[in-house]
Image (cartoon, rainbow, N blue to C red):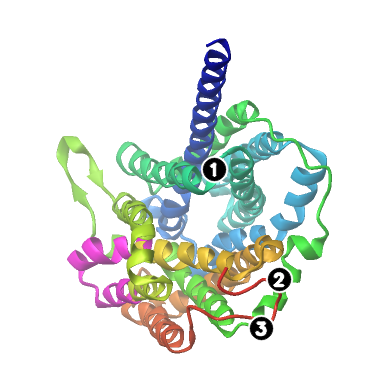
Amino acid sequence: MGDSGTRGSQTGDANQRRTVVSLQLAGMMFWQYFGLGAWVVPLTRYLQAPGVEGGLGFDPVQVAWIYSTFAFGALVAPLLVGPLADRWFAVERVIAVTHAFMAVLMALAAWACWSSRTGPEATWALLFVSLLGYAIGCQITLTLTNVISFRNLEDRLSIFWYVRLTGTLGWIVSGFVVGWLLEPVSVQPLGVAAVASGVLALLAPWLPHTPPKGYGRPIREVLGLPAVQLFTQRSLVVFAGVLFIGGAMNQFYTVFTSRYLADLGVQADLGRWGRWTPELIMTLAQWCEIACMAATPWLLRQLGLKRVMLLGLAGWLLRNALLYSGWRGAIVAIALPMHGWSYAFYTLVGMHYVDRQAPPHLRAGAQALVTFLAQGPAILVGNLLAGMIVAAHRQEAWTDWEAVWRWPLLAYLGTLFLFATLFQERETSNVPGTGNV
């Protein structure tokens, strides 16, 4: 009885510890994505709005360069994550210090916008530099929040799914805070992001202690270069190519949709319930994303991987077809949710495909390489292309949005045809250990 009672007590303590760790990591995810969602969506409208509307009046190319900071961050961050968290410092300390710097940089960005009377060029330069530093830190912490979760969740394949969902919930909550309680077309969202990073900087030291492994990976492994040999598989090349094009075209949506919705007059005044601003309405994508992630395991069993990924690509196509149409009701009810639909069914399911195709010793490198391509060069190319196309179709305060949305619509039509024709769900490779594993 004594041994049985002891074992029961130990089991109860272990279960309690697992619960505490899961809650700690869920809170971390919430604040990570709360801070990001607070400014990524509303900033574009603030930057483009003329001064009489409370904005900064930047042109589309300037806005595109501002949002390209995330692409530069994705190029730099992989070179820093390995040495910092694998060789020198505990992961939770790196997260804390990085978020402290991010809070300072976001506060500097807010000050740059608030003191815009110094001139548009000086404001843009200071905003770009501060957001570039913030973006590098953000890419580091986005990676490390996954690292610390995987290292501390015992049943990570099932529990991590729910821990990560709290991040999407944080994004949604930030949309309601900015859309209902604050003024989106202002410097206020940047202040919220600074506070969120400050909160996480204070909370991170209390996360599960995750010491460095005592080694740092070579740069070639950090960038996933050993996994290049996997690209003898035609289907993996097709997946990566479609992800690159889709990620680039997705910047049209990320950077310019809130401004487009404002031009269409998509908003509602609910009286004492507040205003439904474009930024708040765009959280429909995240609600749909949560539902799709929950349904993904069942759909994979029923339809198979290729058909689910085709659903994701079809969502991209439908989203942009409706944006091109200018049909306000359908844009709100269908197009915006399709953004979350496509992310869940193509991007996230695609990561599952990469993990399945690669042998164990190349899985991390393959994921790193695909993510590097999708979040670095793809975003950079997409931002600059979107900025130039919007600028080419804008005359003073009027934009020919139909001409703008035609470009990603045609691109998504081509990628859907390419994937449907060339992608094979079950393809083997001559790399040892690859294939249907």
Q: Quadrant of the C terminus?
A: bottom right
Residue 241 picture location, percent across and down? 55, 79
Query: Which is closer to the viewer, label 1 or label 2?
Result: 2
Label 3, label 1: how far apart the Cα atoms are: 47 Å
In the picture, the disc for residue 136 is none
Compared to residue 227, the image places residue 126 above or below, namely above
> Which stretch is magenta?
317-340
Res. 432 in view: yes
Q: Does the segment drawn in magenta span residue 335? A: yes
In the picture, the disc for residue 227 is 2
* Image quadrant where residue 436 sits: bottom right
Considering the whole magenta stretch, tell me its main secondary structure. Answer: helix
Q: Does the segment drawn in magenta span residue 381? A: no
Residue 359 picture location, percent across and down? 66, 67
At a point 21% along the width and 61% down the height, the residue shown is: 333
Q: Secondary structure at mark 2?
A: helix
The one nearer the camera, 348 or 337, is: 348
Q: Secondary structure at mark 3?
A: helix
Compared to residue 76, the image places residue 419 above or below, namely below
Identify the mark nearer the N-term, 1 or 2: 1
Q: Which residue is mark 1?
A: 110
Number of marks present in the image shown = 3
Q: Residues within 10 Å of mark 3 (few under 14, many from 20)?
A: few
Q: Which amino acid, by three-letter code, is at mark 3? A: Thr
Label 1, label 2: how far apart the Cα atoms are: 41 Å
Compared to residue 229, the image places residue 417 above or below, namely below
In the picture, the disc for residue 232 is 3
Compared to residue 133, the image places residue 7 above or below, namely above
Q: Which amino acid, by three-letter code, is at mark 2? A: Ala
Residue 309 picture location, percent across and down? 41, 72
The one nearer the camera, 415 or 177, is: 415
